[in-house]
Image (cartoon, rainbow, N blue to C red):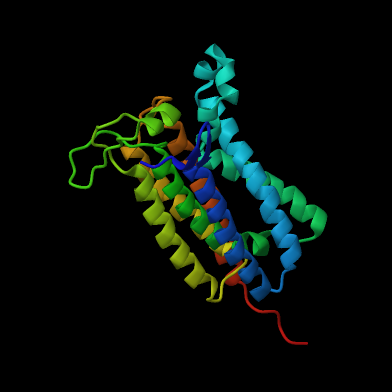
Amino acid sequence: MFPKLIHIGSFYLPTYGVLVALGFLAGLSITTRLARRSGLDAEKITNLAVYCALAGLLGAKLLMFLFDWRTFLSDPQQIFSLSTLQAAGVFQGGLALAFATAFFYMRRSGLPWLKTLDVFAPGVALGHAIGRVGCFMAGCCWGTECSLPWAVRFTNPDAAELTGVPLNTPLHPSQLYEMGTEALLFVFLYWRFGKAHAAGKIMGLYLVLSSAARFVIEFTRFHEQGLYWGLSLTQWIAIAVAGAGALLLARSEVVSGKPAPAAA
């Protein structure tokens, strides 16, 4: 669509990168606001967000390399190419490494694990939604061919060069499907955060609902890495992530169902 926001000679500012940065800032703004409402240290939360963002970018790229290892092994120079830098990577890989980074940082800084996860959930959904707009503008993560009235056609040669998206072909706007579901999820989670909830429930809801949406949307995505037992690798990861979210939800229900301690 419009992968280059500003183009001067050989230099250009990628639209995807700008939108990812805006998504991070928007998500951080929501997270710090919820942290203050929850009585958490906003400075520690900001530091944690920065560390998780860097880990998320790295994890998304690492899982992308793992999925397409044959391609990168046959031509290792592609790892450092501009197209690889522009690629969004695999979101679940970023989420996994961000979680690991968060775990170690929270243990060191003394932040409460589940309560901190909850303040991040709405912001992550918002950042994810904005980032998917960046994917759409760049042409990456494109959908399969379809004949639906809302099918999109990529016509910009820069998009094809950078991401490999087929031009002038009607495709599912998979990026926009995910953008829409994540935006709705943000609204729901932000509203639900304002209601009484046990620690961990908001993040549990995010993991289950976001993974379920991703699982369904994957059926409209083009998969370069192929399918395994009828599902993409991303769908198998989504099942695992949803399972982790279900455990968080089950724990929160058990905690919220415990009777209050008797008064002395």
User: Residue at left 71%, top 74%?
Assistant: 39
Q: Quadrant of the N terminus?
A: top left
Q: What x and y, as percent, mark residue 19?
A: 50, 50
125 over 174 or under it: above or below: below
Q: What x and y, as percent, mark residue 89?
A: 52, 36
User: Residue at left 50%, top 56%?
Assistant: 125
Quarter of image, res 135: top left
153 over 105 or under it: above or below: above
Q: Is residue 209 left or right of residue 171?
A: right
Q: Quadrant of the C terminus?
A: bottom right
Q: What x and y, as percent, mark residue 182?
A: 43, 55
Q: What x and y, as percent, mark residue 72?
A: 54, 19
Q: Residue furthest top?
A: 74
Q: Is residue 143 visible?
A: yes
Quarter of image, res 96: top right
Q: Residue furthest bottom?
A: 264
Q: Total of numbered circles in the picture?
A: 0
User: Residue at left 70%, top 61%?
Assistant: 45
Q: Is residue 236 left or right of residue 39?
A: left
Q: Nearer the viewer, residue 1 or 258?
A: 1
Q: Nearer the viewer, residue 155 or 147?
A: 155
Quarter of image, res 4: top left
Q: Residue furthest front?
A: 9
Q: Nearer the viewer, residue 61 or 19?
A: 19
User: Residue at left 38%, top 29%?
Assistant: 160
206 over 35 or under it: above or below: above
Q: Is residue 249 visible?
A: no
